[in-house]
Image (cartoon, rainbow, N blue to C red):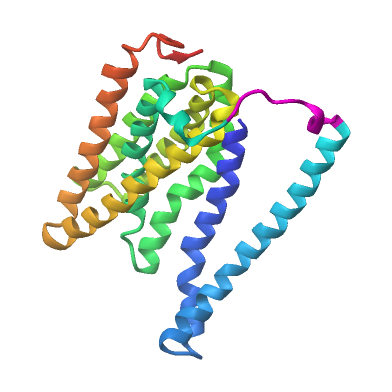
Amino acid sequence: MVFGLQLSIARAGSSANFVSMVSIYDFVHEHFQGNKCLGLALLIAAVSCLFSLICALILAYFDKRASRILKKDTIVVDEKVNITDAKTFPLSFWFISLICVSFYVTIFPFTALGSQKEANFYDSIIYLISTFASPILGIMVDMSGRNLFWVLSATFITLIAHGMLAFTFIHPLVAMIIMGTGYSVLACSLWPMVALVIPRHQLGTAYGIMQSVQNLGLGCVVLAAGYIVDSIGYISLELFFLSWLTSKYYCCINNFYSISIKFTFFSLG
């Protein structure tokens, strides 16, 4: 549920970004040209980062205050943390990272390809759906505890959405709503799985590595997606995304199901 609430707030900001930034740029463009226009538009957007910094400072104050009241600073921690701990991470963690990058490359590069206002609106639907659905789906994941089942469900849902965009003439709004639902399910169920296979004192390292793998995959796939669109077309791009989702789906079934450490049928723990 916590991941769902966090995702809800984050994706509300993403939706606002998709809808507002083009309008902000057009407004600034009426008064400035060239690099000045782009720079001023980015400075206006950077105000949100300043607000984020203020929130982080407030959170740091409360965290320090809680440590003093609860006397956490007096607790001796025997475990030492080192980047080389990654060599000891279980195979299940690396499968989680692989599933993460295989799914997110079909969402983030996909939404980054729209350029006009209407395209930005449809792209923002994914994050708008996530804003409202994530807390509810997070509660459902907590109640069932079957994270892997939800990951598989998210993959299947997103496969349907991309398939609709590629092979049907159904209004894209329907497919984007379905894709937003799949994205919300995946985020609420996948990221908490790391805490179930990695010791608490190594979670920071694990999440950092997972984010690194994800961003490496996104960086490469964005380049590939742009090349595919320019040289072959959007149908081929959808087939490209469908191949990623299919590989992720079979990775979940064939690999995770065979791992016995900390796993039960479609469930962790």
Q: Could you tell me residue 71's position as x and y percent?
A: 85, 30
Q: Residue at x 29, y 18 (%)?
A: 255
Instruction: Between residue 10 and residue 140, name the one nearer to us.
Output: 10
Please, what is the dominant secondary structure of the magenta stretch? loop
Q: Is residue 105 above or below residue 95?
A: below
Whether residue 74 appears in magenta in the rendering, the answer is yes
Quadrant for the N terminus in the image:
top right
Q: Specify whether 142 is left or right of 85.
A: right
Residue furthest right in the image: 69
Q: Could you tell me residue 152's position as x and y percent?
A: 36, 24
Q: From which residue to which does the magenta span run? A: 70-80
Instruction: Between residue 93 and residue 162, name the one nearer to us.
Output: 93
Q: Residue at x 43, y 89 (%)?
A: 33
Q: Is residue 210 above or below residue 254?
A: below
Instruction: Between residue 238 and residue 58, name the one nearer to us.
Output: 58
How many marks do you count on the picture? 0
Q: Specify whether 80 is left or right of 254.
A: right
Is residue 5 in view?
yes
